[in-house]
């Protein structure tokens, strides 16, 4: 025998079909999104045109690396030689010298020049007086605006054979001193010049990152008894890791670019064995020597290696838990 139980109003309401769900709004197309943000894209146009005209369009000229190029015959009239220019590069002893000097200077820059802005930013952050911070920051980043011609002239007047240091040593009866023509220490001199010129400019980025750290974190750590060093280690340095990672990846990508004008100006003083790098090799072999194909091939290889290094460093940063740059 079956027993009919009256269904409650709540159960009938729950069982009754509700109104149909509203349709999902359709995602606007790319053209609609661009038109909606057209004024923002207007500000991007000048920068995009700059890179298009001066960075991407000239890349088409890399076809010269596969030709016996002559400016008088042009790209269309120059004969194709395949990979002959690349083969000539690997058998050229001057390329090996330039590559060795480039890598040595690049490693020295990563070891000494890259951490220098971080250390200076931490030093400025430790100063109590805001006026002292602004004064020191202004003094150290002013050399960034000087050309390499002026910078090398200043260093010549200080560390050259007839400079200030040599004069002081001569007055004390000590042997002469000329750091500007010493090929053995030239690479360290190049790194020191770069640090003196650009360390203040690089500090601005890290100092801005430090300024973005909430001040209450330092106050809470101080209340808990943390020393200034502990606050720096556990609060300041972790906040600088994302910025430092980004700059490190970019520096690794440009590791084969160690300063063309700086080395070109000082090469006559120390010789090509000490001051020849890939950039100066391309200049002397291509612009001055007329071997455009070999010079372009060297520049193309440099760009390919730099791209591979950026992609590898970015992937490694992500595997280690970082964010990378893309």
Image (tube, helix red, strand yellow):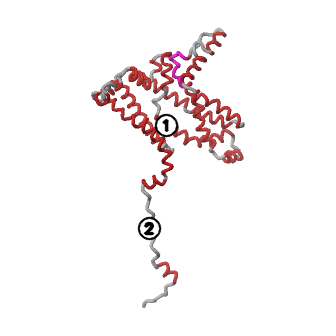
Q: Is residue 71 above or below residue 247?
A: above
Query: Please, what secondary structure does the residue beneath circle 1 have?
Result: helix
Residue 250 image label: 1
Q: Report the residue that reaches farthest toward the top.
A: 173
Q: Residue 244, relative to residue 139: is it above or below?
A: below
* The magenta segment: 180-192
Closer to the chain start, of discs 2 and 1, is: 2
State left or right for residue 120 relative to residue 97.
right
> CB atoms at circles 2 and 1 under 8 Å apart?
no
Q: Quadrant of the N terminus?
A: bottom left
Numbered label tally: 2
Q: Position of residue 295 (x, y in %)?
A: 38, 26
- What's the residue at 44%, 26% (across, down)? 279
Q: Nearer the viewer, residue 56 or 241?
A: 56
Point out residue 233 in the picture as x, y percentages from the top left corner.
62, 40
Measured as percent of width and height from the top left, residue 75 is found at 31, 30
Most frequent secondary structure within the magenta stretch: helix
Q: Is residue 158 left or right of residue 127?
A: left
Question: What residue sits 64% from the left and 40% below the top?
Answer: 232
- In this rendering, position of residue 59 left or right of residue 182: left
Q: Which residue is mark 2?
A: 23
Magenta stretch holds residue 189: yes
Asked whether 24 or 60 is in front, the reply is 60
Count neighbours of disc 2 (C-alpha within 10 A) and say few if under 14, some if 14 to 19, many if 20 or more: few
The CA span between labels 2 and 1 is: 46 Å
User: Looking at the image, which residue is at 66% across and 42% down?
Assistant: 231
């Amino acid at each position: 025998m079956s027993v009919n139980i009256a269904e409650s109003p709540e159960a009938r309401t729950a069982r009754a079909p509700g109104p149909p769900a509203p349709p999902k709004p359709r995602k606007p197309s790319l053209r609609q999104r661009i038109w909606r943000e057209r004024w923002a894209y207007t500000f991007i146009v000048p920068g995009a045109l700059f890179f298009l005209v001066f960075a991407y369009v000239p890349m088409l000229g890399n076809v010269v690396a596969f030709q016996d190029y002559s400016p008088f015959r042009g790209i269309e009239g120059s004969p194709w030689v395949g990979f002959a220019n690349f083969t000539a590069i690997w058998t050229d002893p001057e390329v090996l010298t330039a590559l060795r000097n480039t890598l040595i200077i690049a490693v020295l820059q990563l070891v000494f020049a890259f951490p220098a802005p971080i250390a200076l930013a931490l030093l400025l952050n430790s100063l109590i007086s805001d006026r002292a911070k602004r004064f020191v920051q202004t003094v150290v980043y002013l050399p960034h605006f000087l050309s390499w011609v002026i910078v090398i002239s200043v260093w010549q007047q200080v560390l050259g054979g007839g400079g200030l240091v040599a004069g002081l040593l001569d007055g004390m009866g000590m042997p002469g001193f000329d750091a500007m023509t010493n090929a053995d220490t030239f690479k360290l001199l190049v790194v020191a010049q770069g640090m003196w010129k650009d360390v203040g400019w690089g500090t601005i980025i890290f100092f801005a990152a430090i300024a973005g750290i909430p001040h209450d974190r330092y106050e809470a750590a101080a209340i808990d008894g943390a020393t200034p060093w502990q606050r720096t280690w556990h609060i300041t340095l972790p906040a600088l890791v994302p910025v430092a990672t980004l700059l490190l990846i970019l520096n690794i990508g440009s590791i084969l670019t160690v300063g063309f004008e700086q080395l070109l100006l000082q090469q006559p003083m120390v010789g090509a064995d000490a001051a020849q790098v890939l950039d100066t090799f391309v200049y002397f072999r291509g612009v001055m020597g007329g071997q455009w194909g070999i010079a372009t091939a060297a520049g193309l290889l440099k760009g390919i290696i730099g791209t591979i290094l950026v992609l590898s460093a970015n992937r490694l940063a992500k595997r280690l838990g970082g964010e990378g740059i893309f």
